[in-house]
Amino acid sequence: MNKVIATFAIATLAFSTACSNKDELAAKELNAFCREVEALNTTNDEPLMKSHKLASFLTANMTHEGLKKGFLALAGVDPSQKYEILKRLAEQEGVPGWTCPAFEVYQSK
């Protein structure tokens, strides 16, 4: 019986660690995304050029599968709704309370 409990405890810890690492990766990538948007907001590039640069950044840097799928889905969403959906995506992927005011500004331009 103790062996079963120990095995269960180890499996639970391994699962928790895997989830924690996934959450940390999501937070890291979302924060990198936000920094990239902040940088783009300071340029004088045309909106289409900014969009291309942001898409290139995501392609080159986004490795978290849930976020990659979420960002792909955002392409077809009304710009006025993207920020709220992105915040919900962050929460779903283990980063509750994540915000990126720079993205809200980016979407309003």
Image (cartoon, rainbow, N blue to C red):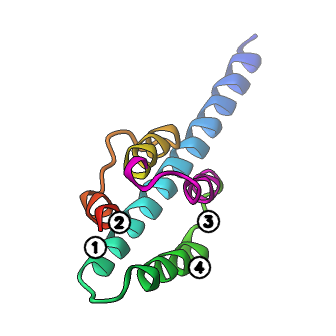
Element assignment for label 4: helix
Q: Which residue is mark 4?
A: 60
Question: What kind of secondary structure does the magenta stretch mostly adopt?
Answer: helix
Gap in angstroms between the C-alphas marked 1 and 4: 18 Å
Amino acid type of the residue tagged 3 in the rendering: Thr
Instruction: Using residue 22 as the reference point, say whether residue 108 is left or right of it.
Output: left
Question: 23 or 50, which is in the foreground?
Answer: 50
Region of the chain picked out in magenta, as a range:
66-81
Magenta span includes 79 = yes
Q: Residue at x 55, y 81 (%)?
A: 56
Earlier along the polypeptide chain: callout 1 or callout 4? 1
Q: Secondary structure at mark 1?
A: helix
Residue at position x 40%, y 45% in the image: 87
Percent position of residue 66, x then y: 62, 50
Query: Is residue 79 left or right of 77 when viewed as pictured?
Result: left
Vertical position of residue 56 compared to residue 100: above or below: below
Residue 63 is tagged as 3
Residue 106: % across, % down: 31, 67
Q: Quadrant of the C terminus?
A: bottom left
